[in-house]
Amino acid sequence: MTVSSETLSAGEAAEMVSREGSGGLAVPSVVQAFAVIDLLADSGSRMRLAEVVSATGLPKTTVHRLLRTLGMLGITQRDNDGFILGPALARYGNARVPNHGEIIGLFYSVIGRMQEELDETVQLAVLTPPDVTFIAFIDSSRSVRLATRLGRRLPVHASATGKALLAFSQEETVKNALEGPLAALTEWTITDRSVILTQLKAARARGWASESQESAANLSCVAVPVLDATGHALAAITVCLPMPIIPEPRQRHLAGIATRYARELSSRISH
């Protein structure tokens, strides 16, 4: 059994667009296009038009128009009677992202030891306001664990990861990340900015952040930042347990272990 904390699957694209409305921040066609791209990426095989329509919940005419446009750009391509990802995506995959390649490599060499110590799923994320994006992870061997994937996104305000990153970011970054609508992913998600800012202050003081069921029910997380030479967050290491609440002593224990490895990562990154 796995516990998922996904916030936007292909089938939720239409719902997100509807929720944002005409005055929201989301551009419907962009959200829908990436829903189709994510669906094809997760599938790993050719998908028929009807399958894409069914999985996304979008109208058939919309999906057909999206696939045609993405095909013109080389993002997708027709394969016999179905669709697959196109060659143009390779260019984005090879694009230079400062520090990410190095920190991902170090993550797998350093955090592998942390995962062996805990046997819990450990993730690496970076700030991509208004979200965090998970760029690496090492899975747990436990039968009940977090289900995750590369490229998974969560709102900064609704995740321990986001709070750990914002707590060690510049004031302008925090302001910009929290300026839009703060959606509630669960009934426990905190959307009051003043409360979130208080949490960020506490996270900065103790060096780590936590959350209980804010991103998904029955999932609680502890996150610590990986800092650069100036003390600002480059990334965050997150440990999530499939339980409603992590007792405070265990939170401190997890944070202590994660902090030790985060400091090792930071010391080995070329600043």
Image (cartoon, rainbow, N blue to C red):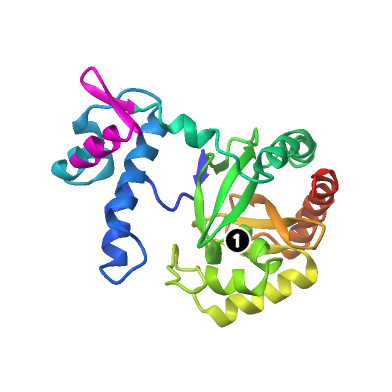
Query: Residue at horizontal 73%, vertical 57%?
Result: 225
Q: Quadrant of residue 243?
A: bottom right
Query: Residue at horizontal 44%, vertical 67%?
Result: 184
Q: How many marks?
A: 1
76 relative position to 257: left or right = left
| Magenta segment boundaries in residue numbering | 65-84
* Helix, strand or loop for disc 1: helix
Residue sitting farthest toward the left: 61
- The amino acid type found where label 1 is placed reads Gly
Mark 1 sits on what residue? 162
In front here: 87 or 25?
Answer: 87
Q: Is residue 146 above or below residue 73?
A: below
Q: Residues within 10 Å of mark 1 (few under 14, many from 20)?
A: many
Query: Residue at horizontal 65%, vertical 79%?
Result: 198
In front here: 16 or 23?
Answer: 23
Q: From the top left corner, tell me how far across and down residue 268 is, in percent.
A: 84, 43
In front here: 236 or 1?
Answer: 236
In front here: 46 or 214?
Answer: 46
Q: From the top left corner, tell me how far across and down residue 36 is, in percent.
A: 32, 40
Q: From the top left corner, tell me how far across and down residue 126 is, in percent.
A: 62, 52
68 relative position to 188: left or right = left
Q: Quadrant of residue 71?
A: top left
